[in-house]
Amino acid sequence: AQSVTQLDSQVPVFEEAPVELRCNYSSSVSVYLFWYVQYPNQGLQLLLKYLSGSTLVKGINGFEAEFNKSQTSFHLRKPSVHISDTAEYFCAVTKKGYQKVTFGIGTKLQVIP
Amino acid sequence: NAGVTQTPKFQVLKTGQSMTLQCAQDMNHNSMYWYRQDPGMGLRLIYYSASEGTTDKGEVPNGYNVSRLNKREFSLRLESAAPSQTSVYFCATTQGWAYEQYFGPGTRLTVT
């Protein structure tokens, strides 16, 4: 079975400061990993994904994530956040040939002016 | 090109009433999903459909039924609504197992 743990339910950070949102996964086979963002009263949209290849993945809006197989982690980072980054972020995992995606419980990023 | 659309956007039901949530996509994707989102619980899969004519249970299927009407449409039915089904419901689609999911805007359902 696959699972995802997002270690922080809320992360407050000052504008222009760096941020890291943590995600750990559990799976016995090769995985595909995703980060989604949800702005208030909207559906989720993809930030970035790791399928294979380079372990450093760049996404939209200046976000990036690093796949670390030995630590089973896929942490999301941004070097300088903006007010507009205030949203909820979801880590998700699936595996090859599998129909279902498992989502974490989400991390609310609050950017403080 | 609307992507994934859901109707209605909001709904209030009384306990025991029934309703159908509609989802349609114009992305020509094979797979469609229904999730519910509750505070502190993330997204939980209710049902999914890998292709037209097939459906399968997800993590929390009790109290729900689905119909994959055609490739474009996937509906979710609550036969006898309960307060525990108060939630935000999202429909999503994907082209393949490893690809990203595309989400609709959601339906906010309150059961009193």
Image (spheres, coloured by chain):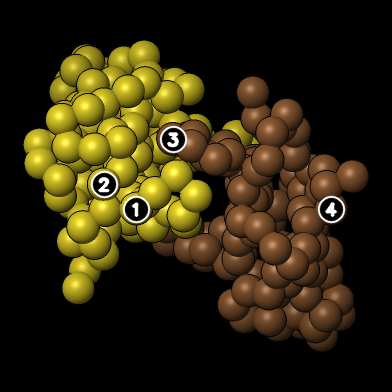
**Number of marks:** 4
Q: Are marks 4 and 1 on the same chain?
A: no
Q: Which residue is mark 3?
A: A99
The residue positioned 10% from the left and 36% from the top of the image is B69
The residue positioned 83% from the left and 80% from the top of the image is A79
Chain letter, colour yellow: B
Q: CA distance from mark 4 to mark 1?
A: 27 Å
Element under label 1?
Answer: loop
Element under label 2?
Answer: loop
What amino acid is found at the position of numbered circle 2 in the picture? Asn
Q: Are marks 3 and 4 on the same chain?
A: yes
Q: CA distance from mark 1 to mark 3?
A: 11 Å
Q: Which residue is mark 4?
A: A68
Q: Which mark is residue B30?
A: 2
Residue B78 placement, left or right of A34: left
Disc 2 to disc 1: CB gap under 8 Å: yes
